[in-house]
Image (spheres, helix red, strand yellow):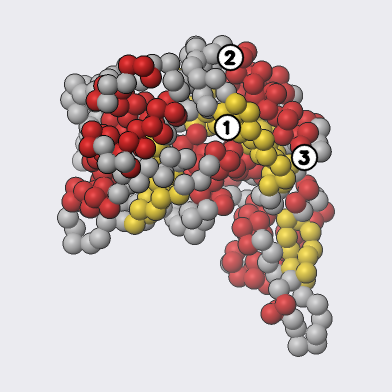
Amino acid sequence: MNRVDQPRPHGAKRTGCGPLLPPVTEAQRPLRLQAFEGIRAAGRVARAQLARDLGISPASVTSLTAELIEAGLVEEVAGARSSVGPRGRPPVALGVNAGAHLVAGLKLSDREHTAVIADFAGNLRADATLPATPGARAPEALIDAMETLLDLVTGRAGLARADLSGVGLGLPGFVDCAEGRVLWSPLLDRRPLDLAALASERLDLPVHVDNDANLVTLAELWFGAGRALSDFAVVTIEHGVGMGLVINHRIWRGGGGLGLELGHTKVQLDGALCRCGQRGCLESYIADYALVREATTALNWPHHVGQSQTVLLESLHDHAKAGNEAARAIFRRAGRYLALGLANVVNLFDPGLIILSGERMRYDYLYAKETLAEMEALVVNAGRRAPAVQTHAWGDLLWAHGAAALALAAVTEARLGARA
Ligand SMILES: [Zn+2]
């Protein structure tokens, strides 16, 4: 371990103290961006209200919004009827010009690929799904699949690729969003891969890449239960176990750009083997493959070898529902490990809410009351209730919706951010 010398109390060196903050232009979001985001978040808002929300004068709002209208990003719309003035004039409010920019959100997985087209106000214009084959593949094959999917969804929206301003792309694995680099993914046969750059070159569009758990978190932050919350966590359980964390209304990406890998936190020394090659990871006890692994042994299913995980998992669930004790025990044990993982999240981050998200949330054995009770028992006892846990059984489109939010945020930043 490196030894770090602590500052000497009587040192004469003038190196300063306090956090070294970046320049103001980087740290503060420009007012025009704040105004635009305020309008988009409200749906429609009167200028006077926007001035109050931003804490600036009505004259400043008038000039800012004139700039946004001139740029074609915002338009005047009919205001809420309740705000009709005493003279009966129709109220005027501001809304986002939805057609100003269109983006695509794509989610690639080893079961199916999904895509959506969203406009600048966040409305969905079209969606599409393509079946996928499991396993790792060459980058070219993944980019081919992405291109086919993109052409399908743009066609459904009556658009050409050139009509889009950007693409958000999500896939499972370790992804450095800022660098656009996939460090590892079960979908790819090589690592690392500058996927954003390769995809951008193929599509001739800006492409932004993130891992799928962060995309679900973005979907909750932009469109779901997280819109009004400053701090919350999303835990996804499907093929793996993912996590996204929102701190002060922003997704937290970590010092190294990877964010959180809850699935690979260790819950057992020398425990079950994980897909990452290490042992005792949380996901090696609760992810789909872990349940199937247990089921093929405990239920003596050698003839099921070669069947898809989805089919095997459905079968395990059916057995549990029918009262098969071995099947129920598999879900119960996984539920206990899930409780342990959630309690660790609470003890580390103290989130205001935990959202459990994924397609398999109907496996109620895993998300039973006992799981939550066990989590509460493992949370540090501060005399307060543990944070609420909500289960959101949304489909794959949610993930693609999050990918669209990633692209929308990037386009907005490019048009109105500090470097615009
Ligand atoms: Zn692992």
Q: Quadrant of residue 158?
A: top right
In 3D space, how far apart are the residues under numbered discs 3 and 2 (Cα atoms)?
27 Å
User: Seen in the image, is 390 located left or right of residue 82?
Assistant: left
Mark 1: give few (<14), some (14-19) or many (20+) Cα within 10 Å.
many
Mark 3: give few (<14), some (14-19) or many (20+) Cα within 10 Å.
some
Q: Residue at x 80, y 87 (%)?
A: 87
Q: Residue at x 26, y 47 (%)?
A: 371
Residue 200 position, x and y percent, is 68, 23
Residue 175 visible? The answer is: yes
Q: Is residue 292 above or below residue 7?
A: above
User: Viewer-proximal residue, 223 or 247?
Assistant: 223
Res 272 label: none
Res 139 label: 2
- Residue ID for mark 3: 157
* Quadrant placement of the N terminus: top left
Q: Amino acid at mark 2?
A: Pro
Secondary structure beneath dot 3 equals loop
- Residue ID for mark 1: 107
Return the residue found at the far front.
322
Q: Is residue 43 above or below residue 138?
A: below
Secondary structure beneath dot 1 equals strand
Residue 208 visible? The answer is: no
Residue 242 position, x and y percent, is 40, 35
